[in-house]
Image: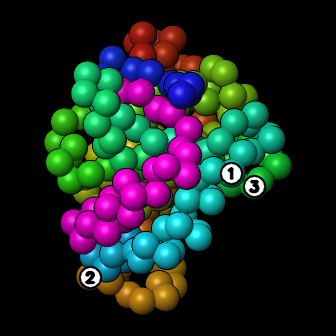
Amino acid sequence: MSVFLETARLALRPFTTADADRLIALHGDPDVMRYISGGKPSSPETVRTRTLPRFLHHYPCLGTRGYWAVEEKATGAFLGWFEFAPLADDIGAVVELGYRLNASAWGSGYATEGARALVDKGFTDLGVDMVTANTMTVNTRSRRVMEKAGLTLLRTYTGEWPEPIEGSEHGEVEYVLGRSDWVRRRTAGGGIKP
């Protein structure tokens, strides 16, 4: 299977229909889903009929997909997924960065490693002008990954939650990184610092 992007420890590859059970397990873990659905697992049917088809979608504006399965290179273990998808299906100038990893992979720096690599690839190879990322205000781990990937806080906002979950009353945050800031940081310091 072709690899979209490699880092020192990770391989990001396109999803296939054979990944359904891996996604069902990932999206079925209450800890993983804590800041998505309050810990409520996604049903296998939802993963098969909504999530996986979205992950298999090809974005013509980028010439690639927007979601990738991530595996640990040393073991081949499925760790979760990364998103680097355009906000509009036909315009690749602004993309959303996202990630969801198995709880067993947390604390290993994988999210930061993959996020940084995607940001760099977006600006160098995919013609991206702006990267954005969102999470709940209280999701400090995800916010730290965004910051380590070079994104900065743009705003805190409150939106309508179909089913409010613990912490949603504090709102959500949006982080961004534009091409000019990315270039300036790379030029000034040889890359984005941890």
**Residue 24, relative to residue 43: is it above or below?**
above
Q: Residue furthest front?
A: 18
Nearest to N terminus: mark 3 or mark 1: 1
Nearest to N terminus: mark 2 or mark 1: 1
**Residue sitting nearer the eye, 157 or 84:** 84
Image spot of residue 71 (x, y percent)? 36, 34
Q: CA distance from mark 3 to mark 2?
A: 30 Å
| Residue 110 showing in the rendered view | yes
Q: Residue at 56%, 38% (x, y): give it.
A: 14
| Residue 72 placement: quadrant | top left
The residue carrying pointer 1 sits among few (fewer than 14), some (14 to 19) or many (20 or more) residues within 10 Å by Cα, namely some
Residue 18 falls within the magenta-colored stretch:
yes
| Residue 148 showing in the rendered view | no
Task: Name the side, left or right, on which 14 lies relative to 105.
Answer: right
**Residue 188, relative to residue 145: is it above or below?**
above
**Residue 176, relative to residue 42: is it above or below?**
above
Q: Nearer the viewer, mark 3 or mark 1?
A: 1
Q: CA distance from mark 3 to mark 1?
A: 13 Å
SS for dot 2:
loop
Q: What residue did someone put label 2 on?
A: 166
Span shown in magenta: 10-32
Q: Quadrant of the N terminus?
A: top right
Q: Disc 2 residue type?
A: Glu
Q: What residue did someone put label 3 on?
A: 88
Residue 152 falls within the magenta-colored stretch:
no
Q: Disc 1 residue type?
A: His
Q: Quadrant of the C terminus?
A: top left
